[in-house]
Image (cartoon, rainbow, N blue to C red):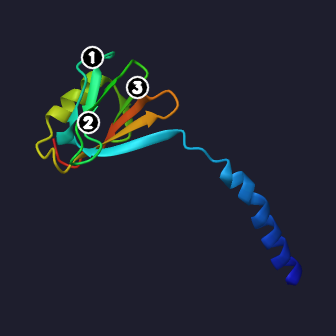
Amino acid sequence: MINKIVFAVVTAFLTIPALAQIIPVTNGYEVALSDVRLPHADGGTIAFKPCEKCSYDTRRVNGDVRWELNGKAVSLSKFRKRCEKIEDVDNNTVTITRHIESNRITKVAITVRDTE
């Protein structure tokens, strides 16, 4: 029994340097749909408020951005059309994911809670 405890403690100490090496790759923002301005086309810009009292943060997007609607990849135009149908924009949130190193938006996702 003591051997198992000693082994567990030693193993835990050996993993500490590995945990120190973890570096976040992406940063996500969850904002109300009312605080997001979607691009009209690939290569346009997306603007969003990272916090309620923040000013809009505007970022250029390209064709590599993944647009997700209820967990499924869709085109930007389909994403925009569906978001335009949402009546309760304050209670539907959009998750915007930014790659930290390249400072680019990589994914914009929404799970729609209202009915069509």
Q: Is residue 7 left or right of residue 17?
A: right
- On screen, residue 77 above or below 30: above
Q: Secondary structure at mark 3?
A: loop
Which residue in the rendered view is the most extreme toward the left?
87
Instruction: Quadrant for residue 55, please give it.
Output: top left
Say which of marks 2 and 3 sits in front. Answer: 2
Proximity of marks 1 and 3: CB atoms separated by less than 8 Å: no
Q: Secondary structure at mark 1?
A: loop
**Labels 2 and 3: the sequence-earlier one:** 2
The residue at which mark 3 appears reads as 65
Disc 1 crowd rating (10 Å Cα; few below 14, some 14-19, many 20+) is few
Residue 44: percent from the left, percent from the top?
Answer: 29, 18
Quadrant in the picture for the N terminus: bottom right
Say which of marks 2 and 1 sits in front. Answer: 2
Instruction: Give the label on residue 41, or none.
Output: 1
Instruction: Give the label on residue 48, or none.
Output: 2
Nearer-the-camera pick, 106 or 24: 24
**Residue that appears at 26% across and 26% down:** 78
Instruction: Quadrant for residue 4, please give it.
Output: bottom right
**Labels 1 and 3: the sequence-earlier one:** 1
Nearer-the-camera pick, 35 or 116: 35
Q: Amino acid at mark 2?
A: Phe
